Image (cartoon, rainbow, N blue to C red):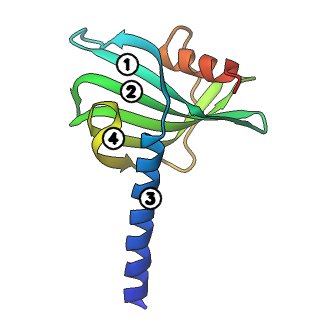
Amino acid sequence: MEKVFRILAVALVVFYMFCINVIKADAEWTLILTESSLDETFDVDFYVDVKTIRKHDGYVYFWTLYDFGKPIKDSLSLSGYWQGDCNIFKMKELTLIKYKEPMGGGASDEEPLDKNSKWRYPLPSSPMHEILNFTCEYDN
């Protein structure tokens, strides 16, 4: 039984990695804004994959990519899958993936998120506010 479990676990990991690479390869990243880091030593580019923007039951779902000018905790980029509420203007992250290379390249590492992650209310003019506003107004 343990052998069957191991085979299923390996198959699941391989399938997951395949899905991430397919999503990444087929992405249509649209630059939303560029902002300087807090210490102003490098810029961060914020992207949304417009091919993944979906609206369902009053929510908008989408992938983001943050591309850093220099490594942050051994990552040069992050991508996240988000759920947004365009009526109340709040959002929560469903998945976070760290990458060793720019633009979602290189080795990846998924960050475990709490299944009951809390809603965030982005501050006006913040990058997350701009991203949620873009995805809510986007008409695909």
Q: Can you say whether 75 is above or below 35 in the image? A: below
Amino acid identity at mark 1: Asp
In the picture, which quadrant includes the N terminus? bottom left
- One can see residue 112 in this view: no
Residue 45 marker: 1
Mark 2 or mark 1, earlier in chain: 1
Q: Can you say whether 127 is above or below 110 in the image? A: above
Spatial CA span between label 2 and label 3:
21 Å
Mark in the foreground, 1 or 4: 1
Asked if disc 2 and disc 1 are in contact, CB closer than 8 Å, the reply is yes
Residue identified by numbered label 3? 16
Residue identified by numbered label 2? 66
Residue identified by numbered label 4? 98
> Mark 1 packing: few (<14 Cα in 10 Å), some, or many (20+)?
some
Spatial CA span between label 4 and label 3:
15 Å
**Rendered location of residue 113, percent (x, y):** 46, 47
> Mark 2 packing: few (<14 Cα in 10 Å), some, or many (20+)?
many
Asked if disc 1 and disc 4 are in contact, CB closer than 8 Å, the reply is no
Q: Residue furthest right?
A: 57
